[in-house]
């Protein structure tokens, strides 16, 4: 009996973990949504409160769930890829991570121009309008870009690639940590950010893949900047300057 008890308990814990993970990965519980309350989960899975809490803690450690006291438990990521990738990237040079982020976002912008639905386009318009309406408030920090209604995240979602979204979240989590350590900062003015976002929105509206790619390339080359770049007093990177010279500099009045 002393052996069967722990084995039984372990199996219940595995069952609970499998149940929660399958509902997240399968899309029954979407990112940003609340999962059922503890009593409901206990009934659905057929386990006790401690087993449910153990499973929730395990997925919270992987970055898939987040419990907000007094509110409930939210889905934060569809898979654990983001957490694993964040840990992996922590051992790499921040400048290399910025370059990797650049490639992901350019691909996302191109794919979004091709694949976006009307509903996703409306979400992008609403996000851009919210930025316009709140432009006198505190400027968006880079860790805001993984929020459910973030302009950048909405573009990645509109790409139609779950893998791209998982990779994007992992990369941005790594950059968020770099920002918290003071290694990078948001290096463009609010007006420039709005102009860039407006240009991207129009390219995606028009399903213009070329403009979407160039617009995102310009934007990501000058929004997140290495802290050491402050010594250069340059408003743009050399890549950004090349794009501007080629005629891809957007105007806020376009």
Image: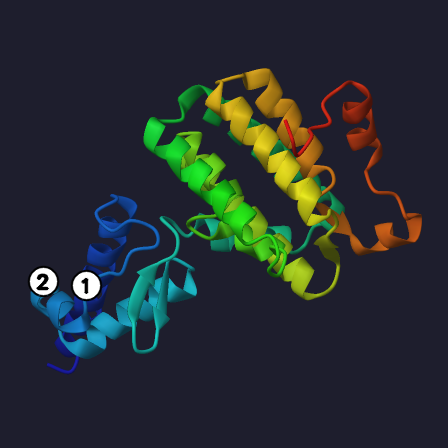
Q: Residue 47: percent from the left, percent from the top?
A: 12, 71
Q: Residue 75: percent from the left, percent from the top?
A: 33, 57
Horizontal arrangement in the rendering, residue 214 relative to residue 2 (left or right): right
Instruction: Kindly identify which residue carries mark 1.
Output: 36
3 in relation to 192, above or below: below
219 in relation to 56, above or below: above
| Quarter occupied by the C terminus | top right
**Seen from this angle, which residue lies furthest right?**
232
Helix, strand or loop at mark 2: helix
**Badge nearest the viewer, 1 or 2:** 1
Q: Is residue 87 visible?
A: no
- The numbered mark, 1 or 2, whose residue comes first in the sequence reads 1
Residue positioned 14% across, 78% down in the render: 5
Labels 1 & 2 near each other (Cβ < 8 A): yes
Crowd tier of the residue under label 1, counting other residues whose Cα lies within 10 Å: few below 14, some 14–19, many 20 or above: some
Helix, strand or loop at mark 1: loop
Crowd tier of the residue under label 2, counting other residues whose Cα lies within 10 Å: few below 14, some 14–19, many 20 or above: few
Q: Residue 65: percent from the left, percent from the top?
A: 35, 61
Instruction: Kindly identify which residue carries mark 2.
Output: 44
Marks 1 and 2 sit apart, C-alpha to C-alpha, by 10 Å
Residue positioned 85% across, 50% down in the render: 229
Horizontal arrangement in the rendering, residue 196 relative to residue 27 (left or right): right
Front residue of 127/214: it is 127
Q: Residue 101: percent from the left, percent from the top?
A: 62, 40
**Seen from this angle, which residue lies furthest bottom?**
2
């Amino acid at each position: 009996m002393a052996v069967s008890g722990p084995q039984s308990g372990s199996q219940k814990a595995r069952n609970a973990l499998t149940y929660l993970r399958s509902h997240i990965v399968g899309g029954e519980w979407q990112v940003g949504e609340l999962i059922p309350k503890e009593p409901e989960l206990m009934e659905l899975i057929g386990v006790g409160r401690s087993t449910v809490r153990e499973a929730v803690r395990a997925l919270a450690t992987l970055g898939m769930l987040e419990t907000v006291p007094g509110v409930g438990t939210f889905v934060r990521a569809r898979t654990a890829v983001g957490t694993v990738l964040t840990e992996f990237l922590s051992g790499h040079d921040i400048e290399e991570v910025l370059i990797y982020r650049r490639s992901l976002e350019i691909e996302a912008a191109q794919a979004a121009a091709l694949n976006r639905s009307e509903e996703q386009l409306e979400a992008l318009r609403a996000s851009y309008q919210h930025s316009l309406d709140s432009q006198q408030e505190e400027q968006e920090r880079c860790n805001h870009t993984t929020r459910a209604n973030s302009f950048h995240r909405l573009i990645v979602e509109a790409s139609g690639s779950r893998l791209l979204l998982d990779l994007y979240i992992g990369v941005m989590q790594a950059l968020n940590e770099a920002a918290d350590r003071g290694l990078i900062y948001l290096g463009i003015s609010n007006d420039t950010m709005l102009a860039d976002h407006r240009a991207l929105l129009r390219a995606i509206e028009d399903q213009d893949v070329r403009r979407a790619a160039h617009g995102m390339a310009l934007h990501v080359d000058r929004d997140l900047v290495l802290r050491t770049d402050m010594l250069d007093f340059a408003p743009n990177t050399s890549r950004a300057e090349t794009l501007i010279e080629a005629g891809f500099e957007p105007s806020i009045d376009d």
